[in-house]
Image (tube, helix red, strand yellow):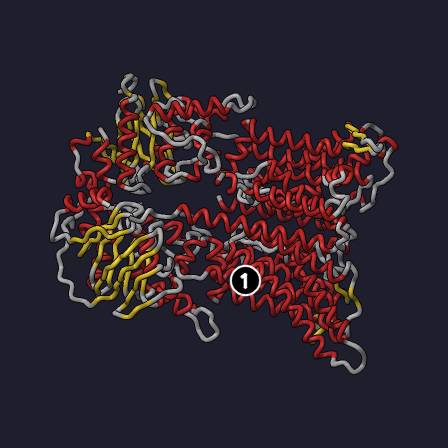
Amino acid sequence: MSNLLKKNEFYLVIVIFALVLFLGITTDQFLDPGNLLELFTSYSFLGTMSAGMLIVLISGGIDLSFTATATISQYVMSTLIIEYGGNIFIAYLIGAGVGVGLGLVNGLLIHFIKKHPLIITIATLNIFNGLLMYFTKGKWIYNFPMWFSDPHDVMVFESAEGYIYPITLPLFLFFIIFVITALILKYTKIGRKIYALGGNKEAARRMGFNIFGLTLFVYGFMGLLAGIGSVSHALIVQTVAPNAIVGKELDVIAAVVLGGASMDGGSGTVIGTFLGVALVAIISNAVILLGIPSYWYQILLGTIIVISVSITAINNKRNMKKEAEINVA
Amino acid sequence: MGESPSYVLDLKNVSKSYGGVKALKNVDFDLKKGEIHCLVGENGSGKSTLIKIISGAEIPDHGSELNIRGQRFKSLTPIKSVEMGIQVIYQDLSLFPNLSVYENIAISEYNINRFSPVNRKKMKQMALEAMKKINVSINPNKLVRELSIADKQVVAITRAIATDAELIIMDEPTASLSKYEIDELLQLIKRLQQKGLTIVFVSHKLDEIMSISQRVTVLRDGDKIGTHDAEALDERKIERLMTGREFENKMPMIREITGQTVLELKNLSRKNNYKDISLEVREGEILGITGLMGSGRTELALSIFGMNKPDSGEIRMYGKAVSFKNNHEAIRSGIAYVPEDRLTEGLILPQPISTNMIVPVMDRLVNGIKALKKREKDALVGKWVGDIGVKTKNPENAVQTLSGGNQQKVVLAKWLITNPKVLILDNPTVGVDIAAKNSIYEIMKKLAGEGLAIILITDEVPEVYRNSDRVLIMSRGRIIDETSPDRISEKELNEKVIGGVLSV
Amino acid sequence: MSLKKTNPFSELYRKYPNFSLLIGLFLLTLILFSFMVPGKFFTLSNFSSIAFQLPELGILTIAMAITMLSGGINLSIIATANLSGIVMASIMKAMIQGQGSPVGLIITLAVLAGFGCSLLVGLANGIIIAFIGVSPILATLGTMTLVNGISILSTKGYVISGLPDGMLFIGNGSILGIPVPFVIFAVVALLVGFWLKNMPSGLSNYLIGSNETATRYSGVNTKAVIMKTHILSGLLSGVAAMIMISRFNSARAGYAESYLLVTVLASVFGGVDPSGGFGKVGGVVLSLFILQMVSSGLNLLGVSSFISVTLWGVLLIGIMIVQKYQRK
């Protein structure tokens, strides 16, 4: 039981549970399945990218350029399907491809320079964004082909009263991606090596782990998910704009960190990240449903981030003090 | 010689140059199967380079011949080395703190069949079998970061033998262990030998070298000085081989201490650190405090130094009660603390020597507008570099450009600049060459002669015996005995220290 | 050992390799663009325009750089500047009623209030980082979000505009021909540079960046140093805000968001080691000039500002690759 108490996810569950309870009582809309489905659909692109960021943080790195990667994927995808047609599968494929490509650029640079992924990805963010703005001139895209605006629902539930509850494709992908990420981290050797890399980079090198390959995988995967998430985003809002996603870097990082991943690397779980995304989503929903002016959202989010990371830091300090105790006679 | 099957390793004519410097000069080195062989040498002797060549981390110069289990190589790679059954356990252990014990032990599984799924059951099995082989038992599900250093050491060794290693090389494995844990480790190493493994043990601790090895190879300045049977050696001989010099001064000092009491502790206690500590130190006196690791000595020292506020009891300086809010106040009052871990706690390696030297006294070197007086600073640094003998061309160079012994001198200088009344030395000669060690002892005695009160905390009984006027023995946070070199022999002191842990 | 001809240039390069590179780049950029855009680049009006635009970015960059010296970072500088500007502008608008109002006094009070506010944010950062022990990225990410939220809440997204003339002078006026913002920037740079080089509390930042433990064991109150540095960082954000709102004649949440990444860029480009321990104000200032000249020169050449941004990113990667080889 004491093991459970130590885990960050446990506290997160309690907070979310409390929020859910509170909202369930004070509003009638929150617990409505339609509301929840729509909420999670709207957060599916953030969630998808969080899974990528989780792996990056576990490996001991960080990536601030993924929003530009996502936006570029969106633009390339949109331009191509508007020009040449296609279907939803091809759209996702293009987005994924562009995302992986840009992610691999990050991976190469970070491996070659060997330090400071934060600064490197700030640089690539500028490069990607700069080029994007130059070539697109900031134009929005909204003249998608008809099939793009069709609902792409994987499953549909119908209630007794005839209400329709769709599991949209973005939402479905969000869940699938989380499951795949969890499987990678727990059951594949590459996933375990990523944990090892984040835990002790030098030891990983001495063990003969292919650091180059792992780095490419980590940042390539982030790019892949940024690309996929960006297509989901385009599907949901049916528009592509240069500044829709750029600027949200810290939202994604916040969700992953709230979920218990450490900035130092070596720790973090998919469940935690999911809970982090859920928390952020629920707060934004709460603000709307409770009629709180939307200006309060940032304040709430900021306060929660500050409190959460402070508690984690204080807990860590306490644990370290305990380890240094002597059994005095 | 050569391809004889009883030799697991036979290196001939191994050289290694870095730029223009030859770290290894035509060294021959052989290992008999099943022996425990000690590799000994000062810092810069080439022993780390030799290890790296054997482990495949470095490629030797042309002309070097590596014969391993009958096969001849010009050089090795890390993977090839492991294939040949060689495992190196580095001083930092190279473990993954965020992974479990069994995952660390069986981690080699991740280098084979890279795309197949993880088989935890198999890995746990591997770990348990490996632990059983050498008769150790650690909870396989615990995360490595939760373990004690001794247990981490065991996990590192278990990992080495889990891969069917034939040769295990251990680099200074006993550095952070208590006497008790060291004994356990040496027993474990003997068990490994019984299983048929060959062990190379890199160390500078003469008593360990003597107690466990069959043969000893001594390196000095890249040359092999010789390989001898351990039976034919003693401490003095090894020292002479390692340094090329003889060192006198193995006798304890017996002196008359007449100075006044500088520091006095009365019933000092701190929860989970130490209890009821009373002691006094006089001007010109060297008070040795020894004991096993984890006895609370460093915690006590930090309390005197203002970094670890005690719960109850008194600290008095020159009879006056003092209470320090932080170490800055302690320094002002004349307490100086030279920490055990020079690299992390004692020096700021990338910064200049001069800066390192004046950090504790920065606020004494400022003018009216609180800016540093550059000329005074330079003069002060220049004087001390000369006085204490730091070998450097330019005091603005980074401290990391200095050798270990010189670095320790910078640390000493830094604290002496603060004009202390009490100097606390916490294991000051860890990782220091024998020559530099003796030089530090000289400096210590000279300072005491000039009236400085010194507290010498050390794990090494010979060191405390030969350099202290009085000796306190601590165990589990308490002082369990007090004696002095004129009352007992070094051997008796050793027995008291080891025996102490059982009687509390 | 080969004997190299020692001339003053190679001496300078040997002692300060990074700085010399920057001076070289500065001169190169100056000459290059002067030739590429003759008659337009090397003109008073161009340099004057740079001298007006650079200071607010420059002060913000210094605010960022000082926190990086100890191995940390301050992601909240822009948010803090915006909030500070909003405070200043709000007070001015609210208290200046008509002809009779003591405008000078009100401006002074408003500016001081803005400084106080930004100082408080710096204090909060300092406490969370130094005393609670949260990593600087996370701590300042949190405060950045919070402060942005407060800005949005208090302005409801609207712009506060129409500042008194006295205030406008700060951002747009000149003293003896030198733009006021530039004077402020020069004073800030000199003072901070002096503090970092000669005063224990400033020097300690480098020490902490290289090894916090050893610095602490040497008697330095590392927590206090980090606190002070963050408070200063906050204060500087407020100073930048003062110039910003004066130049834009308005304040709102969300100005200058793109500046954040540029401040990191300019700091690293100017020699600040992101791991901490090294970096000089002089280098940072030079790098700012270079980046600004590149941007302005390209602008005059008709190159899109987006390409400038891209180029900055490439330059940053370039400098990191160069640093990697220097390390070997």
Point 24% across, 57% down: residue: B443
Q: Is C238 in front, or is B275? A: B275
* C278 relative to B118, above or below: below
Q: How many dots with numbers?
A: 1
Residue B20 x %, y %: 38, 40
Is A304 on the left or on the right of B240, as rendered? right
Residue A238 x %, y %: 82, 39
Residue type pointed to by label 1:
Thr
Let me know if residue A281 appears in the view: yes
Point 70% across, 53% down: residue: A298
* C63 relative to B26, above or below: below
Q: Is A105 in front, or is B485? A: B485
Is B159 on the left or on the right of A40, as rendered? left
Under circle 1, the secondary element is helix
Say which chain tag 1 marks: C
Q: Which residue is mark 1?
A: C229
Residue C272 x %, y %: 55, 54
Point 34% across, 22% down: residue: B67
Q: Is B23 in front, or is A68? A: A68
Tell me the quarter of the picture where residue A191 sits.
top right
Q: Residue furthest bottom?
A: C100
Tell me the quarter of the picture where residue C150 sits.
bottom right
